[in-house]
Amino acid sequence: MEKEDIKIVCKDCGEEFLFTVGEQNFYEEKGLEHQPVRCKECRAKKKAEKMSKEKSE
Ligand SMILES: [Zn+2]
């Protein structure tokens, strides 16, 4: 079956984003079964938050 881009509503900002075929392949390669729940922007934000938290601790 051919893959298609999947539309997902971001958990954080409520915006729709695309889980593209390329990303799906990437996830598969990594053995990840879950689809992302956040858009790229929110994921980047989350990551930055985590990094700055870890630094201050
Ligand atoms: Zn978002």
Image (cartoon, helix red, strand yellow):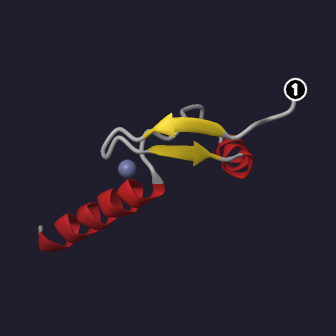
- Answer above or below: position of 39 versus 45: above
Check the image and name the residue furthest to the front.
Answer: 15
- Answer above or below: position of 26 versus 35: below
Looking at the rendered structure, the secondary structure element under dot 1 is loop
Image quadrant where residue 56 sits: bottom left
Q: Give percent across and percent down for residue 12.
A: 30, 44
Q: Is mark 1 within 8 Å of ligand 1?
A: no
Q: Amino acid at mark 1?
A: Met
In the picture, measured across the screen, residue 24 lies left or right of residue 56, that is: right
Image quadrant where residue 41 sits: bottom left
Question: Which is nearer the eye, 27 or 37?
Answer: 37
Question: Which is nearer the eye, 34 or 56?
Answer: 34
Q: Give percent across and percent down for residue 10.
A: 40, 41
Residue at (35% x, 38% y) in the render: 11
Check the image and name the residue furthest to the left.
Answer: 57
Residue at (58% x, 37% y) in the render: 7
Check the image and name the residue furthest to the right.
Answer: 1
Residue at (79% x, 35% y) in the render: 3
Which quarter of the figure is the C terminus placed in?
bottom left
Q: Give percent across and percent down for residue 18.
A: 59, 46
In the picture, measured across the screen, residue 1 lies left or right of residue 38, that is: right
In the picture, measured across the screen, residue 5 lies left or right of residue 57, that is: right
Which quarter of the figure is the N terminus placed in?
top right
Q: Which residue is mark 1?
A: 1
